[in-house]
Image (cartoon, rainbow, N blue to C red):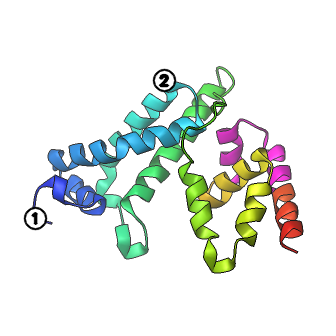
Amino acid sequence: MRGEPADLDEEHLVRRVARGDRAAFEELYRRTSPWLTVRLRRRCSDDQVVAEVLQETYLAVWRAADAFAGSATGGSAVGWLWTIAARRLIDAFRRRAHHAQPPTAGVAEPIARAAEDEVLDRVVGDEVGDEVGDALRTLAPELRQVLQAMVLDGFSVRETSVLLGVPEGTVKTRARRARIAMREALS
């Protein structure tokens, strides 16, 4: 792990952050905060909430970098960061739910394809033909959002409910409808 932080990959940066290396932390922040901000904004249109979650995420990274298991368990530093940020976003929604409705997801059309869409395309890519990808693309947006939250991000029904700002029953119904639609499209 020798060298300048700019020469290291994200996993090594996290390892150096765990040892208290401020330069490694700054480099990790410089590399990952723009991507993380965009991904959080796709889930929440309130810039104040996004800024708070970003700050809480990097504070948690600084404090708990030694808990990062890394590639030894099949994880990645970027995935670990997203997991922390997603949990912090859900916590922020829960805190605000006591005072008002949680901020809704942005409704503006994205300029570029979402990272989730690209990952889904890769996961169901050419290996299994394009049938699964075609089936996913034909899902209604609200069904696809539930699948992305529960399958890609690994959220529970309750967490998906908070994230999307809909009741848990609605999440369950949408997940069931998505499974049925996928089954019909693939049969």
In the image, taking residue 37 as reference, residue 46 lies left or right, namely right
Q: Amino acid at mark 1?
A: Arg
- Counting residues from the start of the chain, the first of labels 1 and 2 encountered is 1
Magenta: main secondary structure: helix
- 149 part of magenta stretch: no
* Span highlighted in magenta in the image: 156-175
**Quick one: quadrant of the C terminus?**
bottom right
In this rendering, does residue 132 appear at all?
yes
**Quick one: quadrant of the N terminus?**
bottom left
Whether 55 is drawn above or below 72: the answer is above
Residue 114 or 98: which is nearer the viewer?
114
Residue 48's disc number: 2
Residue 103 percent location from the top left of the image: 63, 27
Whether 148 is drawn above or below 46: the answer is below
Residue most toward the bottom?
127
Q: Residue at x 62, y 75 (%)?
A: 126
In the image, taking residue 47 as reference, residue 144 lies left or right, namely right
Q: Label 2, secondary structure: give it.
A: helix
Residue 151 percent location from the top left of the image: 66, 60
Residue 154 percent location from the top left of the image: 61, 58
Q: Which residue is mark 1?
A: 2
Q: Amino acid at mark 2?
A: Gln
Residue 145 or 57: which is nearer the viewer?
145
- 167 part of magenta stretch: yes
In this rendering, does residue 88 appear at all?
no
Q: Residue at x 70, y 48 (%)?
A: 145
